[in-house]
Image (cartoon, coloured by chain):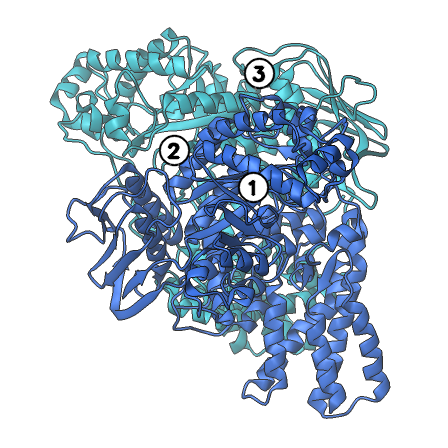
Chain colours: A cyan, B blue
């Protein structure tokens, strides 16, 4: 097995790479692997045979597996199944049926045995088969003799039952094709819940036949027809993925009020919200007509979405419309509701039976949690692990999203370190821990478009997927990044556009100039973190997201590799000198990059904000080279040199054009090492 | 305006690029352009207004134009039309309707006026509007203040009425999505005929309801349903593109015989052909049942394909089945048909009235031409320009494909130099020349898959599109390549995958190793030309097309730029020294690339054949560097050095792994220049 890299086209990249690794490139890592002897050859005689239970979904999955193998190998393969399990390359043995509507906690285990003669995948039901097929696909790679899969035995099952990805399609509209290719990617990572954030202040994205003004007036024409919803659900079911819809209530509902202002607590008028943030409009919890409306709408949506769970949102109600409405204030006094939280609690106690009345279980963001609610609700924690732990202690189930916000532009390693049952949940009893069902990676869409969303979700979400599937002690960050690079390459074959979109967006910015220098800059920077962008510029739903910050990947692989190289160069190890040579290569590239980038910077308004950043990179390159010179020569720099560099370095660490230069801390290490001599 | 480059990610690429050019990036070049003063700003207030004739196709085209502008700029734009032509950014004024079924020779002219305040596109009918929209889109680019289009006036119309692209979907199956994205690309280049090569020895690719065994037994399940055909035709009509189907007869018909052996001239049995080449099976021209069958089938297909023209193929009948069939031989004697050509002529004289009887005009490959045929047939020349000129002299219309075979892997410049009315056609009278309607780029699919076909067609076909549209004297090759690079980038935004597929195929070959060194090698080589591949290895329809020759672009941009650099380095110009510095950079990269590529070469069976090629590149780099050293030092090498290099160079020019190192001739120039001192 080998290290894989993608998105690393410059020759210089190879400097960071070791030659070979003995590790399998599986992600998520399986529960149990026993290596075997030899390899199974995968050639054009490859055929699948089914034994045991059969259903059309399995046949379609077999055809997809052949298609994915074709993409991975470039070999045309037959779609014909083999009738003879003994001679087929891959025998798939399914013990029985899975639930007609996929259930939380259904068995997803599988066993995969590969020998030099044969592979056999067995599972209790089709869900396990789907998971095992992805493992088999990941095992295939080229060696000197052809494509092969290593002999081994794998017994695998997920650690958590709820392994989700949430996409917000309200703030920026995401057509069904975007949703489908992200669900396809989820399936490659064995995720099993697609959480579809379908309504918010900025849009109501589902066709309602009962209340058609919702999509007619609340979506700017950007909504899914019920047929599209149906097709996405079928697409997801084929991949063993549940679809949980979210209709966020009673706040985040401005788009509803653009159509039905009578649901609101304020006087209106209401229009679809164009800004980002937390807004005042909220449903009026005091009026029966609101609940009648919701009963009808939820009835319609409950029929459209077959999953057991129905997400009612419930986050970020600021209560200001309630405060301003005398009738609501009077209602609260009458009913002894002393706070807005209490009023929202009242809303939830009326909403919950409506949802359950339509055969669904309630899931909501952690604000909805109150110990008065029935024990079968699921608390979805976005505010922190404490609320999840608290709910679990009280007997409630929960899932974690705090720490998994992909829109925060944190590293894969950051998310990888967050575990649903650690930190505040570490002290829970085993019984309480069992109530923590898993988690969801969340992609809120203020700063993504259909063009950039793949790049914002993948490959980082794959690290979170491993956290949810693999054993708690699977925590080797270096291994994770190695395997993540493989996943990243493979996902482009599955139709995800995280790499190709990045390239196209850089090409747009270069606007005819060579893309290389812009890519060199983009490769060492990262977008600012968490909610910093909203403080730096006025954004709304019309703001073009076509700048370098939008084209740049959330995480700089180059900076991470550079940090490792600085570590080796400053250590006393054998590779100190070769590491220093490689450092010099990179620092020279960066020092000289500003000159190469100037023609593009001077031609396009989109790049003018980048000019200071590019100058900073050149200065960092120069400072690093000087530090290396001091380190190599053994001369000690005078005090003023170090002081000058430190002043500059403080500057470089501040964001420019909403970007951070991630190599700055490493150059600082070099400078400090030189100064210490 | 600027030079654009795409696919050139290494920093080193910038070495070849000049800073700025005054030329518009339009392709094909318009007939008349008058530059104006200033620029029209394109911002989020962009709106289109229609005046004059309206139809739904125009509304859809406006929505697509907005979408394409969004992709090009990254700015969200409204799809709402403006009611006020005077204040709209782009007024589109259409005088009248075009034909319900697009006709050969319909007016495609348009006029585009851009001022700093307003743009106005006017055309006699929607076809001209579609052409003018593409021109407008190409005018938009970023400058220091924003996105703009330059003020100007364009009056434009095509030189030739038939500007086609043929795709062979028989030898390798191409799903409808592949067809659609290639039609989309055609529309960007103002091409107007999609020639769909639907049947051949290796497949019959259309659902026939009259003879369902044709697609059931003749396609391996890879055929278009009639609904898919219908949708593709609508898709093409929306883009002003005719769809001309080809059913190749009486040869190239083995797949038909797999279903209906009674049509054949031999005893059978027949199976779908898996090899490439010219095969013996041919229809039996002597039997009435054959013509009855064809009458029914052509009737069905004539109703499915609305275009006036119906391509009957007619190429490459080797006559061997006819020679071997005593009954056919007796028939020939009876009817005075002394040669197989005469027998094919007989077939055509019976086929032609069947086709015209179903309301269609006949087009066929140049073998079908005989002076006995009616004058409204179109001769499609693949064998050379002479047959086209001969036919024109005799009063027949014709189109040219000789010189436009994209599967021959020739350069864009090669195809660009071929003109339908030059060479053997140059001496024709004006009246005879007018019979030459244009031409078609042809993509035969022996060596392409859905993965690689875009890379084989685009961007080179764009140079042919310019040949067909622009004035005969538009022949500046350097300008063509500059503008082709812009087109190449823009086509990826239109959904064509020529760049992204190249990267994915290289990544597959690198199989986890850094892609950079493999890309460096791929960038300086080209696949062997014309039909050389079939002499080098046994290919058939199952052969994987996953090797470096398949992943490598047909034309090496780097080698072309390197040749220019060698020219400058050997001249006495001002930039001699900087050119030599750049040469040294490239030669060093190549000399050192083999070492960087070794880990990948050693790991994968797919790359083992590439090892000698990589060694050759390293040797070429070293030889070039030595030559440069001699040139710089002024020392004369001894005779043995030059002799050694020449021996090696003869070797390097031979293909390896079906690839040619395109920089070898340029290194030879350096060696000879050094030896001459």
Q: Is the residue marked by circle 3 packed among few (<14), some (14-19), or many (20+) residues within 10 Å?
A: few
Could you tell me which residue is drawn at 66 percent across and 40 percent down? Answer: B343
- Which is closer to the viewer, label 3 or label 2? 2
Give the class, few, some or many, for how many residues have Cα within 10 Å of label 1's Cα (few <14, many ≥20).
Answer: many
> In this figure, which residue is indicated by the disc labeled 3?
A105
Above or below residue A627? Residue B526 is above
Q: Position of residue A17 (x, y in %)?
A: 70, 55
Residue B91 screen position, x and y as percent: 22, 52
| Mark closest to the chain's N terminus, 1 or 2 | 2
Q: Position of residue A505 (x, y in %)?
A: 45, 53
Query: Which x, y percent locates residue A513?
Result: 47, 66
Q: Do residues under tags 1 and 3 come within 8 Å of each other at their CB atoms?
A: no
Instruction: Give the left or right position of residue A336, taking residue B105 as reference.
Output: left
Say whether residue A527 is visible. no
Helix, strand or loop for disc 3: loop
Location of mark 1 (residue) = A459
């Amino acid at each position: 097995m080998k290290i894989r890299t993608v998105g690393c086209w410059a020759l210089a990249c190879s400097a960071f790479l070791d030659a070979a690794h003995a590790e399998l490139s599986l992600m998520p890592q399986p529960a149990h692997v026993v290596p075997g002897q030899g390899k199974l050859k995968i050639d054009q005689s490859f055929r699948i045979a089914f034994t045991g239970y059969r259903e059309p979904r399995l046949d379609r999955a077999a055809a997809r597996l052949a298609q994915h193998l074709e993409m991975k190998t470039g070999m045309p393969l037959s779609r014909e199944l083999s009738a003879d399990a003994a001679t087929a390359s891959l025998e798939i043995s399914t013990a029985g049926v899975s639930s007609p509507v996929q259930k939380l906690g259904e068995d997803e285990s599988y066993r995969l045995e590969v020998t030099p003669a044969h592979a056999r995948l067995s599972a209790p039901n089709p869900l396990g088969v789907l998971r095992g097929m992805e493992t088999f696909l990941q095992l295939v790679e080229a060696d000197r003799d052809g494509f092969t899969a290593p002999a081994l035995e794998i017994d695998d099952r997920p650690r958590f039952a709820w392994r989700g990805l949430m996409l917000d399609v309200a703030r920026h509209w995401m057509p069904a094709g975007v949703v489908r290719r992200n669900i396809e990617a989820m399936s490659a990572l064995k995720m099993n819940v697609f959480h579809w954030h379908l309504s918010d202040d900025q849009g109501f994205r589902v066709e309602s036949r009962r209340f058609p003004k919702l999509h007619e007036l609340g979506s700017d024409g950007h909504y899914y027809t019920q047929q599209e919803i149906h097709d996405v659900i079928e697409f997801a079911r084929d991949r063993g993925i549940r679809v949980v819809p979210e209709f966020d209530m009673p706040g985040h509902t401005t788009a509803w009020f653009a159509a039905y202002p009578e649901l609101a607590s304020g006087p209106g008028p209401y229009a679809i919200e164009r800004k980002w943030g937390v807004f005042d409009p909220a449903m009026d919890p005091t009026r029966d007509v609101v609940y009648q409306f919701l009963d009808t709408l939820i009835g319609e949506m409950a029929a459209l979405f077959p999953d057991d769970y129905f997400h009612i949102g419930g986050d970020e109600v600021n209560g200001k419309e309630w405060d301003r409405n005398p009738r609501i204030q009077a209602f609260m006094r009458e009913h002894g509701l002393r706070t807005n939280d209490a009023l929202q609690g009242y809303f939830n106690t009326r909403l919950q039976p409506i949802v359950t009345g339509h055969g669904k279980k309630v899931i909501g963001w952690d604000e909805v949690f109150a110990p008065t609610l029935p024990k079968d609700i699921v608390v979805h924690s976005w505010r922190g692990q404490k609320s999840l732990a608290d709910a679990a202690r009280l007997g409630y189930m929960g899932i974690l999203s705090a720490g998994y916000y992909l829109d925060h532009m944190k590293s894969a390693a950051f998310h990888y370190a967050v575990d649903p049952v650690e930190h505040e949940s570490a002290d829970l009893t085993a019984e309480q821990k069992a109530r923590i069902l898993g988690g969801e990676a969340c992609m809120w869409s203020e700063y993504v478009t259909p063009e950039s969303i793949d790049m914002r979700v993948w490959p980082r979400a794959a690290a979170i997927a491993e956290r949810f599937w693999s054993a708690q002690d699977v925590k080797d960050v270096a291994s994770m990044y190695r395997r993540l690079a493989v996943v990243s390459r493979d996902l482009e074959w599955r139709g995800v556009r995280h790499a190709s979109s990045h390239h196209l967006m850089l090409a747009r910015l270069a606007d005819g100039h060579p893309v290389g220098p812009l890519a060199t800059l983009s490769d060492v920077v990262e977008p600012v973190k968490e909610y910093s962008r909203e403080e730096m510029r006025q954004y709304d739903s019309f703001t073009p997201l076509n700048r370098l910050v939008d084209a740049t990947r959330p995480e700089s692989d180059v900076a991470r590799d550079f940090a490792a190289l600085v570590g080796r160069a400053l250590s006393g190890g054998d590779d100190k000198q070769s590491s220093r040579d490689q450092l010099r290569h990179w620092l020279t590239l960066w020092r000289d990059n500003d000159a190469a980038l100037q023609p593009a910077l001077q031609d396009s308004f989109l790049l003018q904000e980048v000019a200071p950043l590019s100058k900073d990179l050149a200065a960092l390159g120069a400072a690093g080279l000087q530090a290396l010179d001091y380190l190599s020569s053994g001369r000690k720099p005078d005090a003023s040199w170090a002081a000058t560099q430190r002043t500059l370095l403080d500057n470089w660490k501040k964001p420019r054009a909403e970007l951070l230069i991630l190599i700055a801390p490493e150059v600082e290490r070099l400078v400090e090492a030189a100064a210490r001599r």
